[in-house]
Image (cartoon, rainbow, N blue to C red):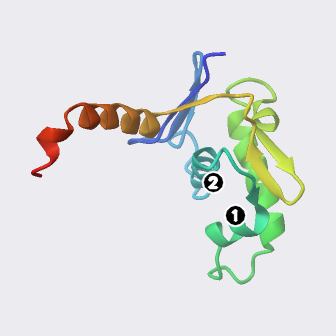
Amino acid sequence: MNGLHVRTFGEFSITYEDRRVSDSDNRSRKVWPLLAYLICHRNRLLKQHELIDLLWGESEQGVNPAGALKTLFYRVRSELDKLWPGAGKQLIVCQGDGYIWNKDYPVILDCEEFDRITGKVVGDNEEEFEDL
């Protein structure tokens, strides 16, 4: 598997082979930020209370946060299912009271690639940047 290509600069999108999902397909206010957060923190288990605080904080008093989070993950997984059947449940794993990205599915994240490339350029030419 070549991996999932995730674009965060400009439009948020995930591409796998010739299929792509993006925030322009579905303008849900919380689906895409949740997915982006999950991918950016893909190497650790994200506890439900962390995600609830992140997404709702104390601003939405009438919300059942645990139920709302489950519904939101259902919507996130539904978007990912457009990449291939069952992708949502394969990519996002529920473990105990949290969620984690399945490490069996590599991610190529544009912002990490940018950091890697610019870090190499700056590192190779470090003396040029010392006076900046």
Q: Is residue 19 left or right of residue 61?
A: left
Residue 69 appears in which quarter of the rendering?
bottom right
In the picture shown, does residue 129 fall above or below 105? below
Query: x and y percent of residue 42 in the render?
Result: 65, 44
2 or 1: tag closer to the N-terminus = 2
The residue lying toward the viewer, choosing from 66 and 79, is 66
The residue lying toward the viewer, choosing from 43 and 13, is 43
* Quadrant holding the N terminus: top right
Q: Residues within 10 Å of mark 2 (few under 14, many from 20)?
A: some
Outermost residue, left side: 131
Q: Residues within 10 Å of mark 1 (few under 14, many from 20)?
A: some
Circles 2 and 1: CB distance less than 8 Å? yes
In the picture shown, does residue 20 fall above or below 111? above
- Residue under pointer 1: 51
- The residue lying at 55 percent from left, 39 percent from top is 25
Q: Is residue 79 left or right of residue 118?
A: right
- Residue under pointer 2: 34
- The residue lying at 62 percent from left, 68 percent from top is 54
The residue lying toward the viewer, choosing from 87 and 110, is 110
Residue 90 appears in which quarter of the rendering?
top right
- In the rendered structure, which amino acid carries the disc numbered 1? Leu
Q: Secondary structure at mark 2?
A: helix
For the image, the number of numbered tags is: 2
- In the rendered structure, which amino acid carries the disc numbered 2? Leu
Q: Secondary structure at mark 1?
A: helix
Q: Is residue 114 left or right of residue 130?
A: right
